[in-house]
Image (cartoon, coloured by chain):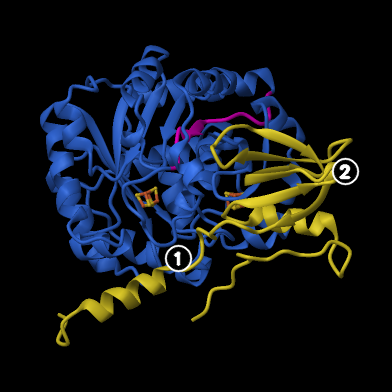
Amino acid sequence: MSVPLSQMWAVASYVLKQRLRGTTRYPLVLMLEPLFRCNLACAGCGKIQYPAQILKKHLSVEQCMAAVDECGAPMVSIPGGEPLMYPEIGRLVTELVARKKYVYLCTNALLLKEKLEAGLFEPSKYLSFSVHMDGLREEHDEAVCRDGVFTEAVEGIREALRRGFRVTTNTTLFDGANPLRMREFFDAMMDLGVEGMMISPGYSYSKAPDQEHFLRRQRAHELFRTMLANPKRRWKFNQSPLFLQFLMGKQDFECTPWGNPTYNMFGWQRPCYLLQEGYAPTFRELIETTKWENYGRRSGNDKCRDCMVHCGYEPTAVNHTFSSWRGFRDTVVATVTGRN
Amino acid sequence: MTEETLEGWAPEIGRGITLEEVIERAFDYRGNVTVVKTDGTELEGYLFNRERDAAEPFVQMFDRAGDGPYDIRYADIRSIRFTGRDTAAGTSYAAWLRAKESKKPASGA
Ligand code: SF4
Ligand code: SF4
């Protein structure tokens, strides 16, 4: 695991505090979407399929911070759309860092070099650029439907690292991914000097146009087992080792959809980052009025049956770590030995 | 491969489909719709939410200019037309691959 100790400590003490208070449903990572606009148009991306007036809109920094304060999660992920296209991204990040939130700014990195050169951000232990990288050059350019994006993203990563920023990668794996190529990809990312990598299978959600393209659960386990077998010690993953074990089929977890709540211009999205079954006006209403029993694998909901996506299952893995000695021991063993 | 779209659909409520069903389709639709109210006025925009379980069920919309959100009670809706472009249609990964293949030179390594 490559998450810095201070961040692990912040998350651990937050989780323990929630448990001592007896809170059963608490958020770990706020998925904050200030806009849906993007400078790419990846096939299968349901986030950008909106009419022009919606793509032109964005949240104000004040709206974002009100959501951050109401939710209280120790980590904030800013996906998109492309957050570097958000006109107030510099101010938003400054405010989040001032609140000591661990921020993952998820970007395709096409604008990263330009924004860094413009002095929009200061290096901080609280800020990581989480660069969307779906594989080596060929695989990535194919996934984002544009040639040349991999090279530009690598340039952005180099520039961010040169300036002393934390950089991680986030990779969504699609059906047909080649495990050997992915192992080469892990090597390439570690050679670049990123702090860690995040991986997750894709999801076939109803508004994504290419459902049959995404991984099904069983095939996903096989893929992750092959890909992560005998992991090299130099590979660092910026995520719970128990989540990686879950991807490999070695842990049986249920989804924690409230673990990564999503806020955007429509409100608090029910029930999770992937499904859009409605919006609540406040975080409290999201938690109190969403019919959580209708979601997760055991609910029998068709939409959840094959889902193994990090936003639902990584919070489960983190909770597992802190809710039992066994979970804690599994995490420590996986972290210390580097074995998944 | 054809991709189904509701673009251009103007269902007549009561003729085999209820208002609630049309609202659900509009909620899932990735384009603007035109809501025709019982008083004869219309609002065109993106219908992003509906509260079926509220004491008085309502939909929420941003209009064509992006202003809003505007809440409209189910009881005040006469019908809904699917007037805007379906932004989810024709953007599949398969369509992109087909386009890419057609641009490649015959030998394509
Ligand atoms: S870069 Fe991300 S937000 Fe933009 S189109 Fe691709 S997947 Fe969607
Ligand atoms: S399993 Fe969880 S994360 Fe996946 S779609 Fe269902 S509610 Fe969302």
**Residue that mark 2 sits on:** B75
- Residue A81 vertical position relative to residue A186 in the rendered view, above or below: above
Q: Which of the 4 image quarters holds residue A38?
A: top left
What percent of the width, then of the height, locates residue A3? 33, 32
Q: Which of the 4 image quarters holds residue A122?
A: top left
Q: From the image, which quarter does the N terminus of chain A lie in? A: top left
The chain containing the residue under callout 2 comes to B
What percent of the width, then of the height, locates residue A9? 41, 22
> What residue is shown at x 24% (from left), y 67% (from top)?
A180
**Real-space CA distance between mark 2 and mark 1, rounded to the nearest whole angstrom:** 46 Å
Of helix, strand and loop, which one carries label 2?
A: helix
Q: Is residue A41 left or right of residue B60?
A: left
The chain containing the residue under callout 1 comes to A
Give me the chain that's yellow: B
> What residue is shown at x 17% (from left), y 57% (from top)?
A148
> What residue is shown at x 15% (from left), y 80% (from top)?
B109
Q: Nearer the viewer, mark 2 or mark 1?
A: 2
**Residue that mark 1 sits on:** A220
**Magenta-drawn segment:** A23-36
Give me the chain that's blue: A
Q: Amino acid at mark 1?
A: Ala
